[in-house]
Amino acid sequence: MKRRVEFTERAGRLRDYLPADDRRALMRLVDKIAEDPYGPDTHLAHTNDDLTRSSWLDSAMVHFLVTPKVVYVIDADIYDAARGFNII
């Protein structure tokens, strides 16, 4: 079952201001997470936190929380060695 996705203000702001190619990469990752938030490409983000998970695909990275019906994207970033991390 695909979960609904909600973005925090910070993550949503980054999503909205990304160039189109970066936004597509981020949304491809978010769609993949919404399909299977506990899949093999996701990981616990912190050793002392069982709720926050992370995943990355190509140049996109997200931290997210999972509830039975919603995935909350709490942090997102795009990394490109030539540009470094995006700063919002």
Image (cartoon, rainbow, N blue to C red):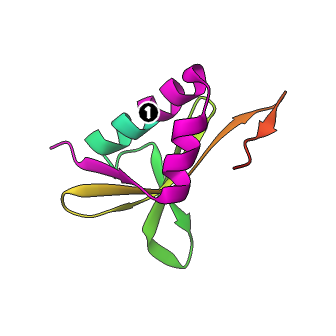
Where is residue 21 shown, x and y percent of the image? 57, 20
Residue 26 part of the magenta-drawn span: yes
Image quadrant assignment for residue 50: bottom left
What is the residue that sits farthest to the top in this orientation? 21
The answer to whether residue 28 is seen in the rendering is yes
Mark 1 surroundings within 10 Å by alpha-carbon count, few (fewer than 14), some (14 through 19), many (20 or more): few
Where is residue 19 shown, x and y percent of the image? 62, 25
Image quadrant assignment for residue 86: top right
Residue at x 59%, y 27% (from the top left corner): 22
Comparing 75 with 44, the one in front is 75
For the record, the magenta segment spans 1-28
Q: Relative to residue 4, is residue 63 drawn left or right?
A: right
Where is residue 30 shown, x and y percent of the image? 41, 40
Q: Kindly state the secondary structure of the residue where label 1 is placed.
A: helix
- According to the image, label 1 marks what residue? 27
Query: Does 69 sit above or below residue 34?
Result: below
Q: Relative to residue 22, is residue 52 drawn left or right?
A: left
What's the amino acid at mark 1? Met
Residue 84 part of the magenta-drawn span: no
Residue at x 59%, y 29% (from the top left corner): 58
